[in-house]
Image (cartoon, grey):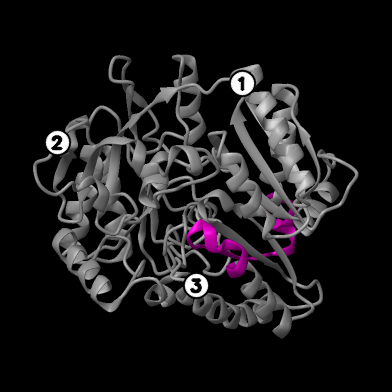
Amino acid sequence: MNSEQIIAALKDLVAAGDAPGKVLTDPADLDTYGKDWTKIYPPKPLAIVLPKTTEQVQALVTFANENQVALVPSGGRTGLSAGAVAANGEVVVAFDNMNRILDFNPSDRTVRCQAGVVTEQLQQFAEENGLYYPVDFASAGSSQLGGNLSTNAGGIKVIRYGMSRDWVAGLKVVTGKGDVIDLNKDLAKNNTGYDLRHLFIGAEGTLGFITEATMKLTRKPDDLTVLVLGLKDLTNTMDVLQSFQKKLDLTAYEFFSHQAMQHVLAHGQVQAPFETEAPYYALLEFEAVSDQVMDDAMTLFEECVEAGWVLDGVISQSETQAQNLWQLRERISESIAPRIPYKNDISVVVSRVPGFLQEIDSVVTEHYPDFEIIWFGHIGDGNLHLNILKPEDMAKEDFFEKCQQVNKWVFEIVERYEGSVSAEHGVGMTKKPYLQYTRSEAEIAYLKGIKQVFDPNGIMNPGKIFD
């Protein structure tokens, strides 16, 4: 079939039923839906399909198998590994119009959602029903549930609540063969062989497409309080973490460098937390459910100051102040975006973070002393975000070429520390050449075998994770 015939067939497929979908071919739509937040690969999709039902998704996959048409899933397009980029004439299946909350079970504290439900939409629904969905990140206002699960997104609350996969009671998927399968049926206990949910969570749409997910909810935390500390040295992040965890259950433990905060302050709308400048800052969040908890927090803060780990600090006195302090961390990405940053999302076990970060920082600085390095991340779970800002007088192409060498240095250190080349954004295309730094040859062979079982014709998000 030629391109015109494929597009005509796609329109017929999604026109069926009571809730017809859409097919878009306008150049502006192709550009919008054919990419994510990565800026390396120009989007070149053939068409954009916006289905409304699982049945339409199944029809698309069946058609794609019969005609060898490659499909790329698209959620909120906030990924940073080019996992949702259609750069080779693929058909994009965008889930924006599958955005309904279908069912709520207060007894089980579960909510069944279509894949296009936005993270913030689910959080607000939970709040309206006196509950809480704890998986949270800066892109919550645009990221979609299907994409979150396809990359097993983590975010800022992992230290307390875990990753996206920890909140999935059940999934409905369309496999690469075109089968519709209900996985786990929302059961808390179901020890009947392999739990296929966890193959599709983190698979980046390479095995099939998630069309519905039943998500678990929990109680809403009480009196969330934020403490921002200026640290004397990077190693003090671990000293402070260990000290506070002895008495408090932290809901978040984030860090950022002085350079990161300077960009946020220059960007406007946010004020410095205190006058003292520090090379690194830690942001702690906890539930201040009693006077005793607050007393413990202040005692711990004083002990950290006396130990020489903390130079200064501030604790929120209201919900508004807590939200303002969070802005110091959450506005980093948008404040450095105009500088076209090279981004890397890496992780090691928590205890090895300081040495790991210092080695990478030293290697990059030694070879490229003119590059500005911005560090921030979820240090409480070992997840670091390395950002290198493009010098203003350097062409984007030259900058990205130099960053390819940075990748090699960084991932060699990752391998030595037995870490991960991708902590929470998946592999996609940007991390694909470096998968072997985290996964063994045997593991990769098994991954490819699983891919062959679910997607024998190789139509589901081809070229992502591995070739």
Q: Which contiguous range is marked in magenta?
A: 333-356
Q: Residue at x 24, y 49 (%)?
A: 60
Closer to the camera: disc 2 or disc 1? 1
Numbered mark located on residue 190 in the image: 2
The part of the image, by quadrant, that contains residue 394 is bottom right
Q: Residue at x 48, y 35 (%)?
A: 119
Q: Residue at x 47, y 77 (%)?
A: 416
Please tell me which residue lies in front, 363 or 69.
Answer: 363
Q: Residue at x 60, y 79 (%)?
A: 406
Could you tell me which secondary element the residue under label 1 belongs to?
loop
What is the distance, in whole Å, between disc 1 and disc 3 at their CAs?
Answer: 38 Å
Residue 39, how many percent across, how many down?
58, 65
Q: Quadrant of the N terminus?
A: bottom left
What is the distance, in whole Å, between disc 3 and disc 2 at their CAs?
Answer: 36 Å
Q: Is residue 22 visible?
A: no
Residue 136, how many percent across, how many down?
52, 38
Residue 117, how many percent across, how many down?
42, 34
Q: Is residue 257 visible?
A: yes
Identify which amino acid the numbered label 1 is placed on: Asp
Instruction: Tell me if mark 2 has few (under 14), some (14-19) or many (20+) residues whose alpha carbon lies within 10 angstroms of its own.
Output: few
Report how many numbered discs are placed on residues in the image: 3
Sequence-wise, the earlier of marks 2 and 1 is 2
Instruction: Tell me if mark 1 has few (under 14), some (14-19) or many (20+) residues whose alpha carbon lies within 10 angstroms of its own.
Output: few
Left or right position of 74 against 324: left
What is the distance, in whole Å, between disc 2 and disc 1 at their CAs?
Answer: 35 Å
Q: Which residue in the protein does label 1 denote?
A: 223
> Is 254 inside the magenta-drawn segment?
no
Identify which amino acid the numbered label 3 is placed on: Val
Numbered mark located on residue 69 in the image: none
